[in-house]
Amino acid sequence: MNRLRYFVENQIFGVCARMGEKLNFPASSIRRYFIYATFMTFGSPIILYLVLAFWMEMRQNWRKHNTPTIWEL
């Protein structure tokens, strides 16, 4: 079961895991609250999740662009 969980965490954007690292809070609790909030508000937190995932991806690409490796020069 842990293998499946780690696979899903690595393949999905990792927004909850990153928030858990920053806030010193377990990622599983953040995921659980996200699911509860999604059901309570009929899906509106999904938009926030997608915005955060987009922001994390753009930030990662921006860092790569600012510090190129020797093969990218």
Image (tube, rainbow, N blue to C red):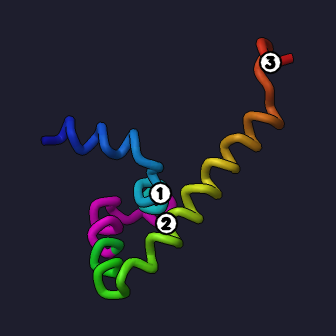
Which stretch is magenta?
Answer: 22-33
Q: Residue furthest front?
A: 42
* Disc 2 target residue: 49
Label whose residue precedes the other's in the sequence (1 or 2)? 1
Q: Amino acid at mark 1?
A: Val
User: In the rendering, which numbered label is found on residue 72?
Assistant: 3
Spatial CA distance of label 1 from label 2 is 7 Å
Q: Where, quadrant-wise, is the C terminus in this rendering?
A: top right
Q: Residues within 10 Å of mark 1 (few under 14, many from 20)?
A: many
Q: Position of residue 7 (x, y in %)?
A: 30, 37
What's the distance in space between the residues labelled 2 and 3, CA to CA?
Answer: 31 Å
User: Which residue corresponds to the image point at 39% horizontal and 77% vertical from the top-left?
Assistant: 43
Instruction: Using residue 48 as the reference point, say whether residue 17 is left or right of it.
Output: left
Which kind of residue does numbered mark 2 sit on? Tyr
Q: Quick check: marks 1 and 2 in contact, CB under 8 Å?
A: yes
User: Which label's residue is closer to the chain start, 2 or 3?
Assistant: 2
